Amino acid sequence: MAYTFPGDSAGKIGAVRPSLDGNDFFVPTVIFGPDGVTPISTTNRLPVDAQITTIKRELAFSTTTPLGANAVYTSPWIDVSIYRTIMGVIKPDQSGSYWYEHSDDTITVLAGNSASAPLGTTVKADSVYLKYIRLKYTNGTTAQTSFQMSFWLSPL
């Protein structure tokens, strides 16, 4: 099947055509298939290999070690430069609190936000702001007998 170039109002084939509003123009373009000869069209579609990549969350850190009275767990600094969100689950058997620390260099804390972690399960998702983040968890005045905390990073 031969490809026919569009024509203008005077019937000139392949001419540049103005847009409907007159502020732009169209230039006919031909894209050839893999053989380099046959133009791509509705009957000769462009062959495309599409591969869907699964977007996965990545485990940032996890701990199940119970904390003593007023003890503090500090996660390692995590490079979050390719992530947008940190999310996690905290399941203490004693009340406590946690906070994020944000840094550009792992030395100077430039931002932070905190929240309480009551008995039971707390599920949390927060945005990341700087290149590095870490989490600190402080247990309450009673030693824990069980504790679970896991956090993941997500590009979304």
Image (cartoon, rainbow, N blue to C red):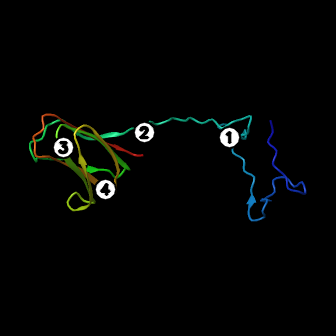
**Residue 49, relative to residue 133: is it above or below?**
above
9 left or right, relative to 93: right
Disc nearer the start of the sequence (3/2) = 2
Question: Could you give the CA–CA distance between mark 1 and mark 2, rounded to whole angstroms?
Answer: 35 Å
Q: Which of marks 4 and 3 is in front?
A: 3
* Residue type at tag 3: Ser
- Give residue 59's mark: none
**Residue 154, relative to residue 128: is it above or below?**
above
* Residue type at tag 4: Lys
Question: Could you give the CA–CA distance between mark 3 and mark 2, rounded to whole angstroms?
Answer: 34 Å
Bin the neighbour count of mark 2 within 10 Å (Cα to Cα): few under 14, some 14-19, many 20 and up: few
The quadrant of the image that shows the N terminus is top right
x and y percentages locating residue 139 in the rendered image:
15, 45
Bin the neighbour count of mark 3 within 10 Å (Cα to Cα): few under 14, some 14-19, many 20 and up: some
- Give residue 55's mark: 2
Secondary structure at badge 2 equals loop
Question: Could you give the CA–CA distance between mark 3 and mark 1, rounded to whole angstroms?
Answer: 69 Å
Question: Could you give the CA–CA distance between mark 4 and mark 2, rounded to whole angstroms?
Answer: 20 Å
Q: Residue at x 26, y 49 (%)?
A: 78
Disc nearer the start of the sequence (1/2) = 1
The part of the image, by quadrant, that contains residue 9 is: bottom right
Secondary structure at badge 4 equals loop
* Residue type at tag 1: Gly
Q: Name the residue under label 4.
A: 131
Q: Name the residue under label 3.
A: 95
9 left or right, relative to 39: right
Q: Name the residue under label 1.
A: 36
The part of the image, by quadrant, that contains residue 129 is: bottom left
Question: Could you give the CA–CA distance between mark 4 and mark 3, rounded to whole angstroms?
Answer: 30 Å
Q: Which residue lies furthest to the right in this view?
A: 10
